[in-house]
Image: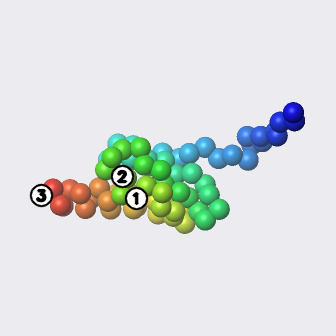
């Protein structure tokens, strides 16, 4: 059986998205941009969404957390 080789030089590492010093998820490169993968329950509302940039994903996570604070007040 022949195994396929996996070129790790082409694979980008996940980028951690933090809001207020708390990691909420990671983004991974994908054909459509950057896909957000939630690692904390509050961020599951945007889990799986794709953004054009890492910064747009970070902004979405920040807005989500800000809205949760407003709703809790």
Q: Secondary structure at mark 1?
A: helix
Question: Can the viewer see residue 16?
Answer: yes
The answer to whether the residues at label 3 and label 2 have Cβ atoms under 8 Å apart is: no
Question: Can the viewer see residue 21?
Answer: no
Farthest residue toward the right? 2
Name the image quarter holding residue 31. bottom right
Q: Position of residue 56 (x, y in %)?
A: 47, 63
- Quadrant location of the C terminus? bottom left
Q: Secondary structure at mark 2?
A: helix
Name the image quarter holding residue 29. bottom right
Residue labelled with disc 1: 46
Q: Secondary structure at mark 3?
A: loop
Farthest residue toward the top? 1
Q: Earlier in the sequence, mark 3 or mark 1?
A: 1
Q: Position of residue 4 (x, y in %)?
A: 82, 40
**Mark 3–mark 1 distance (CA, rounded to whole Å):** 22 Å
- Quadrant location of the N terminus? top right
Residue labelled with disc 2: 43
For discs 3 and 1, the disc positioned in front in the rendered view: 1
Nearer to us in this view, 15 or 41: 41
- Residue drawn at x 65%, y 47% as measured from the top left: 12
Q: Position of residue 32 (x, y in %)?
A: 61, 65
- Residue drawn at x 59%, y 62% as measured from the top left: 33
Residue 44 located left or right of residue 50: left
The answer to whether the residues at label 2 and label 1 have Cβ atoms under 8 Å apart is: yes
Farthest residue toward the front? 1
Residue 73's disc is 3
**Mark 3–mark 2 distance (CA, rounded to whole Å):** 19 Å
Mark 1 surroundings: few (<14), some (14-19) or many (≥20) residues within 10 A = some
């Amino acid at each position: 059986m022949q195994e396929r080789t996996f070129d790790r030089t082409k694979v980008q590492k996940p980028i951690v998205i933090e809001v207020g010093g708390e990691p909420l998820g990671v983004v991974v490169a994908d054909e459509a941009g950057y896909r957000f993968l939630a690692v904390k329950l509050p961020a599951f509302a945007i889990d799986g969404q794709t953004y054009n940039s890492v910064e747009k994903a970070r902004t979405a996570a920040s807005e989500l957390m800000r809205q949760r604070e407003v709703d809790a007040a």
